[in-house]
């Protein structure tokens, strides 16, 4: 067990050294803590992130830690994944494309004690990355004013989790995570004639905190061929201990004089309470279908922002909204024991709908619609998981985003704990 744990830690640490924040070019990442990551792995990305009611012995299901207790006692599981995507942005008659490719996650799991599974890993939590400008004419003159918006950063999550099969089909689990990262966002306003003062605002924050997620699963055998699994998750909301700040710089292009003013909000960032429930049904180990529902209570949190009336950087309510998400997905394998390769391939599908967690100028942010499909290709005892996903972030008042994403994950299943006999 010590060998397995040390190897898992080495995997996570080496992945952390090479870990790039999951890419985004979305202007919506300038709000809140950025774009929220779904944190799913290769096997359930083909099912659009379905996870709460899924229980596998040969995959790592980070989204419900109770599932770790299903890991086979002879197996050590490593799972790494990357993605590539192209996004089309549409505003009115203007369209733009952007590309990203990143290492997404690295996780591991093994049986630590009888009925207890352990997992470690690193996954993205939020992503920030955007750059755009707006140019408008001042009054009826030929002078124009240009606003340049840019931002980068995000929050990472490294975790250690345990899943315990308490009794019969009942399992509980917990992930204890370390959150770290930072963001930098800036807005600068300049004039084409050079006679107007240039004003810029630089927003920044650094996060170093913890996160606790709890999970529960109850698996019941309906008959010889049918198994139902119920799942539930709970994420503990709390302050992150971060002190976000904004530095306002005013520059006079004629005199070359500039002045800086910095405002700080103490302990101004937080993560919300979150809840999830899910159910899955498996028939003859060949067909699995399930549905998840999750709620993140962002609407109960205040967020730091510059007040439009007073100009002060203060905590404000109404900038965030409760986020609801529903996911339906499934997996089909014709015959997992067949000698025919194609009959052992796992075919996956999924759809999801999520409401926005941000308000923009008093209006709802974009709703999210997504469809996915993929394959789990057996390679000896391991799997090559390939999936494609289309995501539409739709807001009638703002930019519409259409993203096509390809995810590739490799799950290694190694029999490290098998005892060999020599006769």
Image: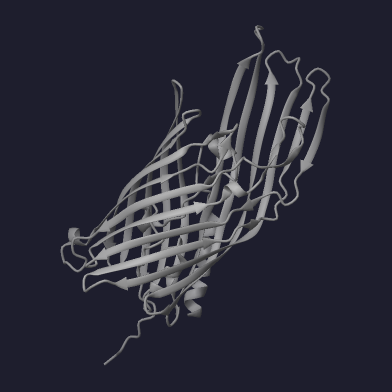
What is the x, y in percent for residue 314? 74, 41
Q: At which x and y percent is residue 20?
A: 53, 50
Position above or below: 118 against 139: below
> Can residue 254 be seen by looking at this rendering?
yes
Q: Is residue 19 left or right of residue 343?
A: right
From the viewer's perspective, is residue 7 above or below residue 394?
below
- Which residue is found at the position 66% from the left and 31% from the top? 187
Up-down: is 30 above or below 49?
Answer: above
Quarter of image, res 143: top right
Q: Is residue 60 among what the camera can see?
A: no
User: Could you tell me which residue is drawn at 57 percent across and 37 percent down?
Assistant: 359
Q: Is residue 313 above or below residue 217?
A: above
Residue 265 drawn at (x, y percent): 75, 46
Q: Percent position (x, y) of residue 288?
A: 28, 61
Q: Quadrant of the C terminus?
A: bottom left
Tell me which residue sits at (54%, 52%) in the image: 125
Could you say which quadrant of the image residue 315 lies in?
top right
Q: Nearer the viewer, residue 163 or 20?
A: 163
Number of numbered tags placed on the structure image: 0
On screen, residue 315 versus residue 345, left or right, reads right
Q: Is residue 65 left or right of residue 75?
A: right
């Amino acid at each position: 067990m010590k060998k397995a744990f040390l190897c898992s830690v080495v995997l996570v640490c080496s992945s952390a050294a090479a870990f790039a924040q999951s890419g985004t070019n979305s202007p919506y990442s300038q709000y809140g803590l950025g774009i929220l990551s779904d944190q799913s792995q290769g096997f359930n990305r083909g099912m659009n992130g379905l996870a709460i009611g899924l229980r596998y012995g040969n995959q790592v299901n980070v989204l419900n830690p109770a599932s770790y207790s299903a890991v086979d006692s002879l197996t050590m599981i490593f799972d790494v994944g990357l993605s590539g995507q192209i996004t089309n942005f549409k505003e009115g008659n203007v369209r733009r494309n952007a590309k990203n490719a990143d290492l997404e996650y690295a996780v591991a799991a093994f049986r630590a004690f009888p009925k207890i599974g352990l997992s470690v890993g690193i996954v993205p939590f939020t992503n920030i990355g955007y750059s755009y400008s707006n140019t408008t004419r001042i009054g009826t003159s030929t002078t124009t004013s240009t606003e340049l918006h840019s931002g980068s950063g995000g929050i990472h999550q490294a975790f250690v989790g345990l899943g315990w099969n308490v009794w019969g089909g009942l399992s509980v689990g917990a992930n204890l995570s370390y959150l770290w990262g930072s963001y930098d966002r800036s807005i600068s306003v300049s004039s084409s004639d050079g006679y107007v003062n240039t004003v810029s605002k630089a927003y920044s924050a650094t996060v170093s905190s913890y996160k606790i997620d709890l999970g529960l699963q109850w698996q019941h055998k309906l008959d010889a061929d049918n198994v139902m699994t119920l799942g539930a998750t709970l994420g503990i909301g709390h302050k992150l201990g971060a002190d976000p700040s904004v530095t306002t710089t005013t520059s006079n292009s004629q005199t070359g004089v500039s002045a800086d003013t910095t405002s700080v909000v103490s302990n101004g960032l937080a993560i919300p309470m979150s809840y999830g429930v899910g159910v899955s049904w498996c028939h003859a180990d060949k067909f699995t279908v399930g549905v998840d529902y999750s709620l993140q209570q962002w609407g109960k949190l205040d967020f730091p922002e510059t007040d439009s009336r007073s100009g002060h950087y203060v905590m404000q309510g109404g900038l965030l909204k409760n986020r609801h998400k529903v996911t339906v997905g499934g997996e089909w394998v014709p015959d997992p024991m067949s000698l025919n390769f194609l009959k052992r391939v796992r075919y996956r599908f999924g759809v999801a709908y999520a409401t926005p967690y941000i308000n923009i100028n008093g209006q709802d942010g974009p709703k999210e619609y997504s469809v996915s499909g993929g394959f789990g290709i057996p390679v000896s005892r391991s799997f090559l998981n390939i999936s494609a996903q289309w995501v539409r972030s739709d807001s009638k008042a703002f930019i519409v985003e259409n993203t096509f994403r390809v995810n590739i994950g490799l799950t290694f299943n190694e029999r490290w704990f098998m005892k060999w006999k020599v006769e």
